[in-house]
Image (tube, rainbow, N blue to C red):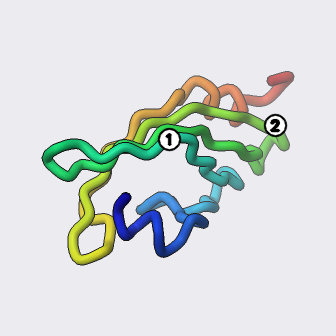
Amino acid sequence: MPEARSRDRNWRSPGSGARSSRTSTRPYDETWQETTDGTIVVTGHYRGTARATGHAYEAEFTHLWRVTDGRISWLHQYTDTARWHEALSPGEP
């Protein structure tokens, strides 16, 4: 498995980090695979709370990573954005 995983299992998504101004979010990884070209495929889910509404949510994700010199140098993310939007919307989730 890639160095990025073995060094620190408490990883944070590049860019948004584990916390953003709109949500308090944590990623939970479930599977890790490395492709023949070195791309890392991570599946899992985000779990968090929208700060403005207090609504909790859980959204699946798939991350495609490339690692250079032991650091994530490229990331493409797929996630269930409907879950995030529902949590951020006023009213019942």
Left or right: where does residue 1 sit relative to residue 82? left
Left or right: where does residue 8 sit relative to residue 49? left
Return the residue nearer the eye: 80 or 31: 31
Question: Residue placed at 60% from the left, 66% from the top?
Answer: 10
Return the residue nearer the eye: 28 or 56: 28
Tag 1 secondary structure: strand
In the image, is residue 15 above or below residue 90?
Answer: below
In this figure, which residue is indicated by the disc labeled 1?
31
Mark 1 or mark 2: which comes first in sequence?
1
In the image, is residue 3 above or below residue 53?
Answer: below
User: Which one is closest to the eye, mark 1 or mark 2?
Assistant: 1
Residue type at mark 1?
A: Thr
Left or right: where does residue 87 sit relative to residue 29? right
The label number, if any, that marks residue 80 in the structure image: none
The label number, if any, that marks residue 55 in the structure image: 2
Q: Tell me where residue 17 appears, x and y as whole percent.
A: 53, 63
Return the residue nearer the eye: 46 or 15: 46
Residue type at mark 2?
A: His
Question: Residue placed at 81% from the left, 40% from the top?
Answer: 53
Tag 2 secondary structure: loop
Q: Tell me where residue 93 appears, x and y as whole percent.
A: 80, 24
Q: Tell me where residue 40 appears, x and y as whole percent.
A: 31, 49
Question: Residue placed at 30% from the left, 52% from the top?
Answer: 65
Q: Quadrant of the N terminus?
A: bottom left
Left or right: where does residue 42 sit relative to residue 28? left
Question: Residue placed at 53% from the left, 72% from the top?
Answer: 8
* Residues at marks 1 and 2 touching, judged by CB atoms closer than 8 Å: no
Question: Which image quadrant is residue 42 in?
Answer: top left
Q: CA distance from mark 1 to mark 2?
A: 27 Å
Q: Tell me where residue 86 appears, x and y as whole percent.
A: 68, 26
Return the residue nearer the eye: 62 or 85: 62
Q: Residues within 10 Å of mark 2 (few under 14, many from 20)?
A: some
